[in-house]
Amino acid sequence: MKKHFLSVTKPFVHQSLCMVGVLAWIATIEQVVAQSPPGPGVGYTNTPLLPNSQWRVHDKYRPRPTIVKAGEALGQAPSDATILFDGKDLSEWKRDGRKEEAAPWKVGDGFFEAVGGSGSIVTRKEFGDMQLHIEWSAPEVVKGESQGRGNSGVIIMGKYEIQILDSYDNNSYADGQAASIYGQYPPQVNVTKAPGQWNVYDIIFEAPRFDGEKLTKPARSTIFHNGVLVQNAKEHIGQMAHQEVGKYRAHSPTGPILLQDHGNSTRFRNVWARRLRDEVDPWVVMPGAADPKLPGKGKKIVLISGDDEYRSEESLPMLSKILSEQHGYDCVVLFAINPETHTVDPNYQSNIPGLHHLDDADGMIMCLRFRSLPDWQMAHFAKFAMEGKPLIALRTSTHPFNFPGASKSAYKKWAFNSKEWEGGFGQQIIGETWHSHHGKHASQATRGVIPDAAKSSPILKGVSDVFGPSDVYGVVHLPSTATVLLQGQVVNGMKPTDPPLEGPKNNPMMPLAWTKDYQMPDGKAGKLFCTTMGAANDFLNEDLRRLVVNATYWMTGLESKIPDKASATVSDKYIPNNFGFKPATFFTELLIRPIDLVK
């Protein structure tokens, strides 16, 4: 897995789950539930799979297109656009190369104008694949010639230039004319309007793709100039260059839009952009390795990510890789998906597409926190539990669901604070609901201690040194019929070398990992493994990874095949981020696809 979105941001201060926080959180969830995605559309589940796709022909579970309101008139921004100039100010722009310096260009009546010598300006937001609309006007009074007339440029990602030039009766070189991909491709035709009149660009830009330093897909631009197609899906030869052939250099998947100061008073108005998204499956399928001798061959595990604090969107793809590549399991990883962006958003509480994969799964690994899923998604989860299928619950999965306020959900009693079904699914099935942080959050780490009675458990084969930076949870409802495999020692610090905390916190220690039987009302009996460890950076610990691998063997009936020291090797690309909450807009701006989390 690559180091991704959270790695370059400053960690946010942890927000403790005090009662005031719970009340504010519940108010937020009530709003989210009202925006829950619709159920499956009318369609089929028995039609053939489409080539190179997880979708079937007319698939009922395939997400329907997001509804977007178009602009009232041609050229007006649709409802999902990012407005980059509203006719009033340049708050969406800054001076190029200056971290926070305001854009120094002139703002007029509904337009802004380049100020020669002041420097180029760039957007504060970054974009990758996008639709860009921009209107521009060369100075009415013609001064200069060739590239000296109304020269500017739209430089996408700060690297790929679409030329702006007064090309009306201008005999400059072809690949420098208006709407050229500068230095590479002239426009098919010249439709530039006379100086002083407004020109319109509509640009469809596809960002290049890189695998490390290697280019795997070049950038591509489609350009309409004043409504006329002048560049038809042209592949950029490389990044912009003058008097030489441009070359590609690997860069991040997004970048700002730059408007060039070329010394001319070019004007701009009505600037907006829409981020484009590939249609990709909102889950990730990882088939088991081909070796038929691997014990997990032919068994399917569904891993469900959906917590807003402990970065399970990072850890579960990593665990899935270990299980599929090193042990042969067929794995499917599900994510919390924002239905507006169709991208990963663990802050969005009420949508985890793909839960129908549970219908034929042999086991489930879940890391959920306070989800408010719609009934049609919950039905697959309920069916799995009613059939008594085995599961593994990580960290916040002791409190996986919440249906607050006026919720009409048929699963409302599953909520972590249910009085009708005391403690909900967490307490009744997993063995505990949300109780407390026993260790001090973000300052007292956890060490797993094996009780004498559990040392012969096959789940603990090769497991001796379990440590993680997440704290010990309070566990007070675990039934005596559960088998405790690890006790949680509160560490007086955040490093593995730090000593145990002295005092009553460790006397006695809290259960940290256990197995137990479960049975839904009127359902079949099943078994589960739970550990209240499970932050993404907890899994930097090899023995914790091995513990989950062993538990997977155990839950899928392969207990006798658990190796003495099961493989749990992690890629050096697994650089998880620290736990912590993120603001509501954090993930909607990053637009992370599920596939981005497994590269």
Image (spheres, rainbow, N blue to C red):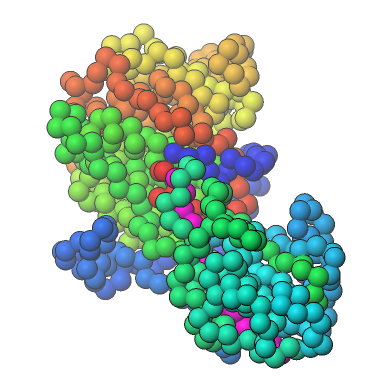
Which residue is drawn at the image coordinates 57% and 35% (left, top)?
578
Check if residue 34 falls in the magenta segment: no
Q: Quadrant of residue 63?
A: bottom left
Q: Is residue 129 visible?
A: yes
Quarter of the image with the C terminus is top left
State the count of labels.
Answer: 0
226 or 182: nearer the viewer: 182
Query: What range of the chain is rendered magenta?
Result: 197-211
Q: Position of residue 457 (x, y in %)?
A: 28, 16
Q: Quadrant of residue 523?
A: top left
Q: Position of residue 297 (x, y in %)?
A: 18, 35
Q: Left or right of 458: which side holds 577?
A: right
Q: Left or right of 221: which side holds 153?
A: right
Which residue is drawn at the image coordinates 42% and 22% (left, top)?
542
Q: Position of residue 506 (x, y in %)?
A: 54, 15
Quarter of the image with the N terminus is top left
236 or 197: nearer the viewer: 236
Which residue is drawn at the image coordinates 18% and 32% (left, top)?
291
Q: Quadrant of residue 77?
A: bottom right
265 or 291: nearer the viewer: 265
Query: From the viewer's perspective, is residue 450 above or below residue 120?
Result: above
Which residue is drawn at the image coordinates 60% and 13% (left, top)?
498
Q: Main secondary structure of the magenta part?
A: strand
Name the residue furthest top.
Answer: 452
Q: Is residue 585 visible?
A: no
Q: Position of residue 22 (x, y in %)?
A: 60, 48
Query: From the viewer's perspective, is residue 524 above or below residue 264?
Result: above
